[in-house]
Amino acid sequence: MINEINSNSINYYPLIQPIDAIYSLGGSISDLASRVNDYVRESILIQFVLGAALGMVAGYVTFNFLTLPVVTQLLGVEKTAKILAQNPFADMKDMDFIEKFFLSIEACIGAPILEEIIFRGFLMDAMGSQFNESFREYFPEDTVQRVAQVATILFSSIIFGVVHFFNAIAFSCSPVLLLPQVINATFGGIGFAIAKELTADCEKEPLGPLRLPIYMHFGNNLMYCIQLFI
């Protein structure tokens, strides 16, 4: 499927191969998502419940099987355990019920909507356009969009994760203590971004392609908020 590449271009064929493989898998997932979406399209409630459940499951899997291994690899077992023990979010359990309630409203409603509009909306759209334009010099026409899409997902998610370091200001703590959250948010951002791409055909529906990422983001944050009350 790779046509000849401009003579002035670098041969990126080894990079394109895994991207094509990812897209083959993504195409199958997209077909499945499309069938499920058609089934539940008539009920926003069902869409919301399924999206939130998916977000909770993805959040659990991401933290335990991606974030923790990465942080442990970077810092070692002892330092990772120490950071988790000093997690500034742990102090939130000492809040009274009213404080926890309003914090949960902000985390489960305000944050998912605002952050998805900014990062999966404005940022991804801007980066996608820029990458599409820039990559034309290096990749064949039939591959540019795919490479640009993968780059957009990765870089927008990294920015989304790094922004969570600013929570250190709110908690007046060392940014190092937030490393697990930053890495977890990066992985989560990748999931939300992929969800947006898989529902790109929902432009004319409420919330458009941001609908599933918002629902998943809600479910992910809800999982952590529930722990405040336990």
Image: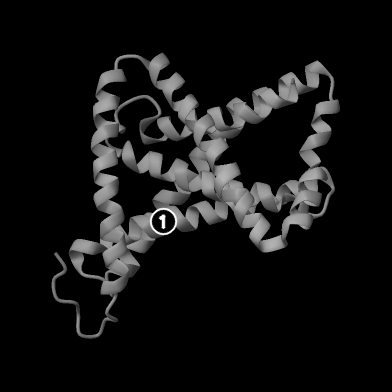
Q: Is residue 30 left or right of residue 156?
A: left
- Looking at the image, which residue is at 73% across and 19% down? 101
- Looking at the image, which residue is at 53% across and 33% down? 217
Is 194 in front, or is 226? 226
- Residue 129 x %, y %: 35, 57
Quarter residue 85 falls in: top right
Quarter residue 110 falls in: top right
Which residue type does callout 1 highlight?
Answer: Thr
Vertical order, 182 against 104 (above or below): below
- Residue 153 x %, y %: 42, 53
- Mark 1 = which residue? 152
Total labels: the figure holds 1
- Looking at the image, which residue is at 25% across and 85% down? 8
Q: Is residue 195 left or right of residue 10?
A: right
At numbered mark 1, what does the secondary structure look like: helix, strand or loop? Answer: helix
Q: Alpha-carbon neighbours of circle 1 within 10 Å: few (<14), some, or many (≥20)?
A: many
